[in-house]
Image: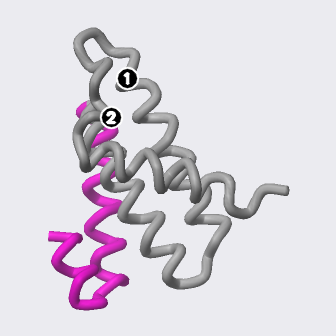
Amino acid sequence: MAEAMIKVKDNTHARQELERSLLQANKLGLKPLSAQAHYLLAGIFQASGDQVEAQQHYQEVHQLIDTMKNDPGADKILQRSDFKTMYTEATRGSQSTKG
């Protein structure tokens, strides 16, 4: 739902939807869904010019995927194009305002 809202530039409602989804995913321990929500939130904040908030969400994505890589049977998670894209952009985004 949030992705559709982002595509039509309804970032306010997309952000609300993602924050709700993130709370639920964290409560249930759904790391892949949490990573995706943080990734989309980072994009929303980046588009609005809030680089600090975007960087924080990118760092969460990076940390979640690093954690998932260490889970049994998930050592090839970065072979999935969606996680590879999120991880690559999160690595870049989490370092963009450092220095």
Instruction: Count residues near mark 2 (Cα–Cα under 10 Å), then give few for <14, some for 14-19, many for 20+.
Output: some
Q: Quadrant of the N terminus?
A: bottom left
The residue furthest right is: 99
Q: Quadrant of residue 43?
A: bottom left
Q: Position of residue 17 (x, y in %)?
A: 26, 68
Disc on res. 78: 2
Q: Position of residue 3 (x, y in %)?
A: 21, 71
| Left or right for 76, reference 62 | left
Q: Which residues are magenta?
A: 1-28
Disc on res. 69: 1
Q: CA distance from mark 1 to mark 2?
A: 8 Å
Disc on res. 95: none
Q: Main secondary structure of the magenta part?
A: helix
Closest to the observer, 27 or 87: 87
Q: Quadrant of residue 53?
A: bottom right
Element on which disc 1 rests: helix
Element on which disc 2 rests: helix
Closest to the observer, 34 or 66: 66
Q: Position of residue 46 (x, y in %)?
A: 53, 74
Q: Are marks 1 and 2 in contact (CB under 8 Å)?
A: yes
Inspect the image, locate mark 2, and give the three-letter code of the amino acid beneath it: Leu
In the image, is residue 97 part of the stretch drawn in magenta? no
> Can residue 24 be seen at all in this image of the molecule?
no
Q: Residue at x 30, y 90 (%)?
A: 9
In the image, is residue 27 part of the stretch drawn in magenta? yes
Q: Residue at x 51, y 74 (%)?
A: 45
| Left or right for 65, reference 83 | right
